[in-house]
Amino acid sequence: MLNRLIKFVAVMVLVVSGHAVAADNTSLQHFGVSATLGYISESFLQQNTQWEVPERVYAAAALASIPGLVSELSDPVFDTEDMAFNVAGALFGAWVGQHFNKYVFVGFERDDDMNASAIGFKLKF
């Protein structure tokens, strides 16, 4: 039961961190965007590689940290606090993705015959 509660809280933090983009605090923005990118990166790597958990999570976090690094390098002054929030958010998002991707699947499909695209969301109960 405690394990399920921890996972539920982790998902809620990820959902809330996605809304941090609208916040005034840039550190929260960096964390929220990087957490979302970490989740997406881990999902992609889980579906498209044979990597095991530690390598996949670290690779997803590294991939998710790249936009934050580019952002910081383009700023006039490199902000180490923002970069720390980028990396923390990316690791958190990848960790959440690793735990929940066996229960949640988000996919994208393109049908050229119908000239349509679809985003699918599936839950395993």
Image: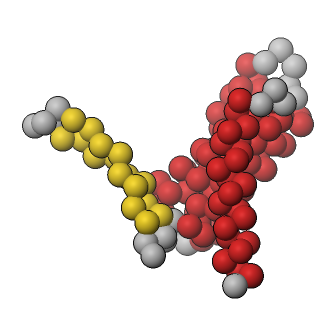
Identify the residue at horizontal 67%, vertical 52% (top origin): 14
- The front one of 2 and 109 is 2
Where residue 67 appears, x then y in whole percent? 65, 33
Q: Quadrant of residue 54?
A: bottom right
Q: Quadrant of the N terminus?
A: bottom right
Q: How is the image coloured?
A: secondary structure
Question: Which residue is at the far left?
Answer: 113
**Image check: 94 left or right of 27?**
left
**Image check: 92 left or right of 26?**
left
Residue 115 against residue 62 in the figure, above or below: above
Q: Residue 54: tell me if it is visible.
A: yes
Residue 28 against residue 44 in the figure, above or below: above
**Image check: 40 left or right of 65?**
left
Identify the residue at horizontal 78%, vertical 50% (top origin): 88
**Image check: 57 left or right of 24?**
left
Q: Quadrant of residue 6?
A: bottom right
Please tell me how many numbered marks the rendered image carries. Answer: 0
- The front one of 45 and 2 is 2
Q: Quadrant of the C terminus?
A: bottom left
Where residue 110 appears, x then y in whole percent? 24, 41
Residue 116 against residue 98 in the figure, above or below: above
Identify the residue at horizontal 43%, vertical 72% (top origin): 124
- The front one of 78 and 43 is 43
Identify the residue at horizontal 70%, vertical 80% (top origin): 3
Question: Which residue is at the far top?
Answer: 76
Q: Residue 62: tell me if it is visible.
A: no
Where residue 108 appears, x then y in whole percent? 34, 47
